[in-house]
Structure formats: C-alpha cells, structure tokens
Amino acid sequence: MANKENMRRLLAPKTIAFVGGSAMADAVIRCKKGGFAGEIWLVNPVKDEINGVKCYPSVKDLPSAPDATFIGTKRDITIPIVKELNDIGAGGAVCYASGFAEMDSHGENEGELKQQELLAAAGDLAILGPNCYGLLDYLHGSALWPVAHGGKMVEQGMAIITQSGNFAYNISMIDRSLPIAYMVSVGNQAQVDVAGLIDAFLEEPRVTAIGLHLEGLKNVPNFAAAAMRALEKGVPIVALKTGTSAMGAEMALSHTSSLAGSDDLYNALFDRVGIARVTGPVSFVETLKIFACGAVPKGNRLVALASSGGDAGLIADYSDNQGIALPKLSAGVTKNIAELLPAYANVANPLDFTTAIWGDRDALTKCMDNLFSDGYDFCLLPLDFPGEASGENPQCELIADVFQACCKKHNVPGAIASVFPELMQEKTRQHLHSIGVPALQGLEDAVTAIGKVMAYSQRRQDILNRKDESTQALCPADELNGEAIAMDEWDSKQWLQKYGLPVPAAKLVNAAEAEQAAAELGCPVVVKMVSKDLPHKTEAGAVKVNIKTPAEAAAVAQEMVTRLSLSHPQLDTSRILIEKMSAAPVTELIVGIKREQGFGLSLVIGAGGILVELMKESVSLLLPTSRDAVRDAIKQLKVYKLIEGFRGKEPGDLEATVDAVMAVANFAVDNADKVLELDVNPLMVLPQGQGAVAVDALISRAE
C-alpha cells in the first residue's frame, strides 16, 4: 500500500508535473484553465518547450519534488521515471502506460514481471495504475489526465472510482450536473486499489458519497473493511458492477457451486456492508445525485405531488416496483387540501394538485405545508422545465422554491425530478443543487434512485444496530493449494456433528452386519452405500429409503453390493450406512459452503432435495455470519412459505433450522484453511418443536 502522506499529496497537490510529449503540454494548459492554483511543470528530455510550455529535461531538474505527476510515456521508460520520482521524494504518480499485468491473458508473465519491477521502483511513491487514464480532482483543479474532460471545480461532491477509463471520460462529459469531487481510473491497481482509495476519500470531508464502477475486486476482505468504515462514517457507496452472469459449477461434488455464481457473492458482499447496487449508468448517476445533496431519508415513506394525474400514476407504479411506501393521507390533511383545490382534484398520495394553483405562492405553500405535515421520510415533486421560450419557467421555479422551503420547514429531504430527462436545464439543476435539492432527470430513474437511497438508509441502520458476526471482518480469502480430497458421507457427518449439526442415528457396517444394525436402530431405516467416489448416490442407485424390517435391510444391502460391484468395478463396497429414517419434513433445504477466489468462504442456503434442480433458488452470505443474518436469508426463499405454515399446514421449526445452518457456518469458519466446498442436502426442516436434521452431507477439503 502507498505511503499515506504521499497519497494525501497526490489527492491534494500543490505542485504537478507532466512527463511526456506534446499531449502533455495540452494537459498542462487544461490544468491551468481548470482552476489549479499551484505550480505546473512539463518534463521532456529533448525539447526546451512544447506549445509555449517550458520543458525540464528530467524530474531531477524540477524546482522541487512534485506532489503529483502524470507519466505519459511508454512502459519501459515509465519504470525509471517512477524510481527517479521516488528518489527525489515526490508524492504520487499516475502511470498511463499499458503492457503490464493486463497483457498476460494467454499465460505469459512478462507483463506481471514488469509490474513487479514498477512496484519495486516506486518505493514510497503512491502509484495509480498502470494502464489507467488517471485522476481528475475537481476540489483542487488538478487533472492528471491524458485527454479532455468535461467537469468543473466544486466545493464538495462525490468521488467516483472506475476500472474503465472510457466510463470515467464519459461521466465527466454528461449533461446532468453531477457534482464530482474526484474521478479515478484505477487500471491494474498494482499498488493503490479500490479499498485504498475509499480509505483516502474518507479523510476528505468534502467527499459526500462514493461511486464505484467495478469489473471485479482483488482483495474482498480489505474492500469490505473499507466499505464498513464508510458506512460507519455515513459516506454512502453506490456500486455499478458489470459481469453479472453466474459462473458454472467448478466441481462435480455438489450443487452448491451451480447455485451460487460470483455475482451472487457480490450481492452478498454489498448487502453485508450496506452498498447500494444499481444496474445501469443512468441509475448510478441519479442515485449519486441524491446522496451528494445529503438528502438521505430515514425510512421508505414517500409523499409525492404532481400537477398531472398521469405523473401521479407513474409514481405509484414505479414506487411499487421499488418497495417504496406511499401512505394514505390523514383525514385532516385530506380535508384541508380539498378546500384549496378544485373539486375534480384527486386528493391522495401521490397528490395531483392540478394547475389551478400554479403561480399562487400562498396556495402552493398551504398545500405543501398540509401535505408534508403528516410526517414522511422523503418528498418528490415531478416538474418539467420546458425552457425559457415557453414562458412557463417562472411558474416552475416558483413551485420549486416553495417545495424547497416546505421541505426545509418540515425537516424532510426531497427531490425534484423532470418526467423527461431533457426537460431539466443546467441552470435549473445548478440552482436546485445549490439549495440542497437533488435535480433528478427522468421520472422512472428518479423513483428508482429514491428507492435505492431508502434501502441504503434502512440497511445502514440495521447493520449499525446489529453489530454481530455478520459485521465482522471476512474470513481470509487465501487460495488453498494441494489436491482436493472428497470425504464420504459418514466422515463428513462425523466432522459436522461435532459442531452441532443434527444428523440421524446411524451405524457404519458391512453388508453382513446390516440386519443387526437395523434391528438396533429400529426400523424404518435407510440403507446407503458409503464411498467418496459416489457423491450422487441416488443417481447410482446407492440409496434405499423406508426399509421396514431388519431382514429387508440385509437383503437391500446385499443386492446393492452385488449390483454396484458390476456397474462400478473399482468401487469399494465394504462400507454400508444404516441410518434411522427421518420424519416427514415440512420442506427441505440445501446448505452449502463455497470457496471463490478473492472472497474466501461463503454460505449458500437454498431450496433442497429435488427442488435444487427445479427451483435453483438460493441466498448467499459471506462468512462469518450470524443467526439473524441466516434467519433473514431463509425468509427470502420461496420455500419459507412452507416453514411459515402454508395454507394452514403445520409450520416448520425455524429456530432449529437456523441452529443447523449456523453449525455448518461455524464449522467452515473454524476450518477455513481446509474446506474447499461443502454440501448438506437435504437439511430436513421438521414440524415446529421437532427440530431439523441433515440426512446427507459431503465435504471437499484441501490435503
């Protein structure tokens, strides 16, 4: 990780150097025009000046060690320049060149070796990249950037971290008045990664929110720790994560891998640390606008007013999709507003206040005063500004000013949204943002953004209030080397039972001992062939349930040995499991442990038994986790309706089921240096008061 003081110098420089050719002269000019007030130098070894900008022959010849440097040279020239910067005590540098670790996609390691060489040269120097566009700093006017950009200096705003230089470039150019404090293209993250940038931005009080555009994360535990610090400090994080397709199963052992792809684990990660996840660039921008203005609601109760029944109807539909509550107006408020509006007005929430009181400040104020007095978490006003030529802008501006004043009076955050994105001009957006009202563009995107902000607020409070295992540091994400060893059902159950996982009474015998074992256990029993080479026993005909007599158990065991010896000649058929038959369950679950590169271990809970393939429904939790988190996860499954007691049927034993899942989770945490994957399927959820029981389990461990 970079030296912290040098990281601070990079993010708040007093002196800047650009190293490179003619394009760097343009970058110098852009910094000066952009408002940077410090010294700016250009380094070029063969020219005295470029486009009127003086050149120094090397960084060693600069008047002093620069706080921030943009190195716009080829790979092999970049490395010695980085070393020189470190030698003279520079702060930080952007390494624009490519040809490092990103080029090793076909198994070569030349790029990785060059990247390690770069890191060695850097020493204490804070390095962004390589293979990145760089850093735009709109708090200080610094633009360590190779091309044009469209941003402006701000007093405060959000920091955006992206793994795509083009995404950063386009965000800077959009016409949406997004108050950006910092824009960082991280490239290869050889030294400074996303987690390090989050920590650095948390030290700048003028950064009000953080936006992430991610393709993937290298160190999930470090990222989670940084995101948790942001949550505790009240700096919201919004993430746009690309690459959402589920990964295929990596192992033939179980269903767990196919149930939980990498995107499910990102969802689990974001939920654990309270990150608001969005699905597209527009939603990303509009959600950040709300956070940037500090308009964070405490709950999900929305009140909305519009001058059109059509707009009110759209708000109702979009709110329902986002889980936003639109409480009914109280009788007193309904009566007061009805007296202000014409008889044809529909006094409800959302309120269609018609155009009858447009231009009437007193009537608008009374209407909104009454409407907001019921107490809500957020207020929304859809309002299109058709432009100066229409002559209607003054009335729209009046409505907006009354709305802001009433929001402030009632201490409730609010936003104004144009129904059509184009009908909110820059002048209007800038004015609204200056008075603390988010200027949202596009009604559907606006309501979606409000829903994301509300969900963030509620999730943040839940996490801060919980303070249990689910908010602790994640399990180490180290990869395990060595051969994967599949344990058979008997050994897997013995290991898990020590952690409290309930399993049926059972005996491990040979075929000749099956009858006595069944008699001692008491029928009905289940007969199974036990072998690590038979992970899916049902498909192989290696399991028979509901055996009613000891003699039948003996006959089934012998027949199984004979048949499997012929169909699987390499199979060891000497181990037979005689197991007490479980009572009929309310439903069945699958509980699994999955190891994913970067994430470490995760817990997967889903519909089990034959429903695994049919429903393919699961919830993932990162470890360690807590009883509350496990209970919440189970309640997200469709089969939870059966546990509740579907259509008057007997409910399942939820708390005993949570105990069983926690036994698996605790086992995995304690054995994180051994477990590769684990599958408990099915976990029988028995009727209330009767518990839960795992009737099959398989573990894969590293030797």
Image (cartoon, helix red, strand yellow):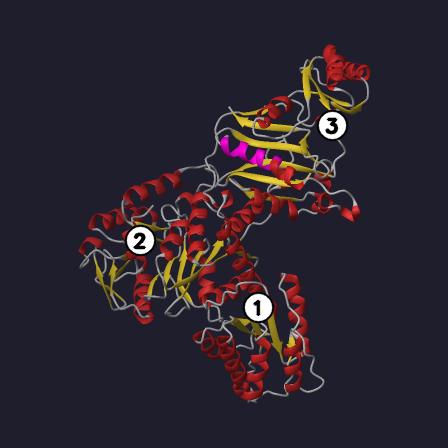
Which segment did they paint magenta? 660-670
Labelled pair 3, 1 in contact (Cβ < 8 Å): no
Q: Which residue is mark 3?
A: 538
What kind of element bears circle 3? helix
Amino acid carrying mark 2 in the image: Met
Q: Quadrant of residue 501?
A: top right
Q: Residue at x 39, y 41 (%)?
A: 111
**Which residue is at the front of the view, 184 or 532?**
532
Magenta-drawn stretch contains 664: yes
In the image, residue 652 lies at what x, y percent? 71, 41
Task: Specify which label sits upstream in the sequence, 3 or 1.
Answer: 1
Disc 3 from disc 1: Cα separation: 51 Å
Residue 205 position (above or below residue 90): below
On screen, residue 479 versus residue 113, left or right, reads right
**Residue 610 on image: x %, y %:** 74, 36
Within-10-Å neighbours for mark 1: few <14, some 14–19, many 20+? many
Measure how far apart labels 3 and 2 are at the Cα level: 58 Å
Residue 69 can be seen, yes or no = no
Q: Which residue is mark 2?
A: 7
Is residue 477 shown to the viewer in this render?
yes
Residue that protrudes farthest toward the top in the picture: 512
Label 1 sits on residue: 446
